[in-house]
Image (cartoon, rainbow, N blue to C red):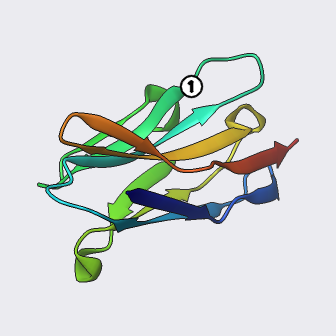
Amino acid sequence: QVQLVESGGGLVQAGGSLRLSCAASGSLFRINVMGWYRQAPGNQRDLVATMTNSGNTNYADSVKGRFTISRDNANAKNTVYLQMNNLKPEDTAVYYCDLKMFGNDYWGQGTQVTVSS
């Protein structure tokens, strides 16, 4: 079993910052990718940012230059963070942590991020 526990969401004014955390635990072997996706009401779940074990990152165009993904190297790379700066109302969504391992996707429960204008 794999568990992903997210934290750090909340309400912030436009231009503000939040930092999301996701800690993975359980039967973890050869994690390939960890990352973040988001889903706004009525929309599909979209990629925000991902990071491979080798440190390669991928960002959605809409967040480039504002969001930064990182992983905790001291913790066997089992924690992933998303630093979100200069937040905009359109960033409002439920943010989900994702872990890819052996071709499977594991998801966290989601954390709400609300940006007021």
Write the residue at 25% across / 83% down.
Answer: 74
Q: Describe residue 55's horizontal placement relative to residue 49 as left or right.
A: left
Which quadrant of the view contains residue 20?
bottom right
| Residue wearing tag 1 | 45
Q: Above or below — where is 45 with respect to 83?
A: above
Looking at the image, which is closer to me, 81 or 32?
Answer: 32
Between residue 14 and residue 2, name the one nearer to us: 2
If the image is split into quadrants, where does the N terminus sit?
bottom left
Find residue 4 and report its horizontal and vertical position in percent: 48, 59
Q: Amino acid at mark 1?
A: Arg
Question: Residue at point 29% right, 36% down?
Answer: 104
Residue lying furthest bottom? 74
Residue 103: tell me if it is visible: yes
x, y percent for residue 17:
66, 61
Position of the C terminus, as image quadrant, is top right
Disc tally is 1
- In this view of the protein, can residue 20 be seen by the observer? no
Instruction: Indicate the quadrant where residue 44 lies.
Output: top right
Q: Position of residue 76 (x, y in %)?
A: 22, 75
Q: Tell me where residue 113 appears, x and y as whole percent.
A: 73, 49
Bin the neighbour count of mark 1 within 10 Å (Cα to Cα): few under 14, some 14-19, many 20 and up.
some
Q: Nearer the viewer, residue 50 or 13?
A: 50
For the point 64% across and 51% down, which residue is it?
A: 86
Task: Tell whether 65 sits left or right of 19.
Answer: left
Residue 62 is left or right of residue 110, and the answer is left
Per the image, label 1 sits on a secondary structure element best described as loop
15 relative to 83 in the view: left or right: right
107 w.r.t. 7: above or below: above
